[in-house]
Image: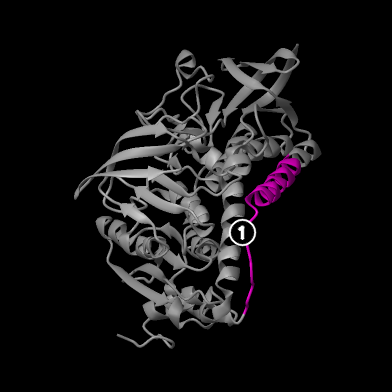
Amino acid sequence: MTREADVVVIGGGPGGYVCAIRSAQLGLRTVLVERDQLGGICVAYGCIPSKALISMAKLYERAKDGAKFGIVADGIRVDLAALQKWKSEVVSTLENGVAALCRGNKVEVIEGTAEVINAKRVKVMTSGGTEEIVTKNIVIATGSRAISLPGLEFDGTLVLSSTEALALEKVPESILVVGGGYIGLEICGVYQKLGSKITIVEVTEQLLPGTEPDLVRLPQKNLEKRGAQILLKSKVLSLEKGGGKVKARVSTPSGEVVVESSIALVSVGRAPLTAEMNLEGMGVKTDAKGYIVTDQRMKTNVEGVYAIGDVRGQPLLAHKAMKEGAVAAEVIAGQPSAADWKTIPWAVFSDPEIAGVGLTEKAAVEAGLQVKRSRFSFAALGRALASGEAEGFARIISDAKTGLVLGVQIVGPEASNLISEAALAIEMGATVEDIALTIHPHPTLPEAIMEAAEVAAGRPIHQVKL
């Protein structure tokens, strides 16, 4: 069987389905090929399942500790199997929603594994056989996969990737987390709240490598307060499996230690999924890590071949992939579109949350800018106190001469939600004066950004001027 298309999008994750829908909206005959679930890793095995579990684990802990707020809940417990069932229902709802959007926009969805023959032909293996698609354009949106380490290969039972870790139906007594990045921290935070003993081994000198140390301090303190053992500048030398448990030899600055745990979660990064894309055969350029090289219009060096999302490289974020998907579709349709955004916000769903957008102080100084750094503590914010979540701060990095907002970092309650205002401010070229003069509703958490802007403008009200 052979069909024709203007665009074949390979991969139905956040970037892929957005690209397919936008392409169809622009009048292009669009085929979307997905081998697993619409929504991709994000919806099925990553962003959504993890945030569902994080939200409920936080709710459980709040209820369990409710006596200090005058809320007494006796005998509260977690039925993890029921929680996982609810999480799966959330995932299913979103997957069905993506399918409905594809149908509503007349995107042809094929469930199967795609193999690129050349820049104009794609073979798809489905449960009913094989078919070929002759196309004018190919968009590669195949995403990424978790990588393991020698001696720490995933087995799905004792040595887990994030996918298996998010599907556990019994709370492990203990977890060894190899890698202190955001995925490991988010997942271990869930199970720690549900009762697991956590040990984190990170090879660098801090958790969340690359994040400013003062942003990481609070999440680390909270992990340790709940009993986590955090081994920095450390490395797993070997891992033994036996008796339904794992035993790891770990090199630390203080010497070698042995860590025994019920399971090991290996979270040391991700690699692009491009095995069946025939990149070498087509002559598509990749970088040293295997990511596909494109220009700002998502074009590769091969005419008619585009790449978006994780396969295009860092940062590996769903919201970045979505925007890239829209750009690729618009470029294919002949529109003057490109990745012209100034910055991409990020968030880590730790406890408390961390989020950032734009330049850090260090990056701004290295760029030759004169900067001002201003911050406001959630401990001085009425809504944070009233919610019982007063840890952390909001910080604005601005140009000392013009007041232009260069970057914002937040650690504290709802940081992931608060950062969008900062992203808009940077995208629109706002100054600290613009934010300070914008009336924010009271009492709310976004007031922290306004208050930090007032500090930067030199007229703080709810903070003593230094």
- Tell me if residue 72 is in the magenta stretch: yes
* Residue 358 found in image quarter: bottom left
- What residue is shown at x 63% (from left), y 65% (from top)? 76
Residue 297 location in percent, x, y?
A: 52, 36
Residue 20 location in percent, x, y?
A: 67, 35
Relative horizontal placement of residue 305, taking residue 252 as reference (left or right): right
The kind of secondary structure the magenta stretch mainly shows is helix
Seen in the picture, residue 207 relative to 99 is either above or below; the reply is below
Of residues 72 and 155, the one drawn nearer to the viewer in this rendering: 72
Seen in the picture, residue 51 relative to 378 is either above or below; the reply is above
Residue at the farthest front position:
243
- Residue 14 visible from this viewpoint: no
- Residue 241 visible from this viewpoint: yes
Q: State the SS at label 1.
A: helix
Residue range of the region highlighted in magenta in the rendering: 71-98
Residue 70 location in percent, x, y?
A: 60, 82
- What residue is shown at x 67% (from left), y 16% (from top)? 125
Tally of numbered discs: 1
Relative horizontal placement of residue 434, taking residue 332 as reference (left or right): left
Q: Which residue is mark 1?
A: 56
Seen in the picture, residue 141 relative to 112 is either above or below; the reply is below
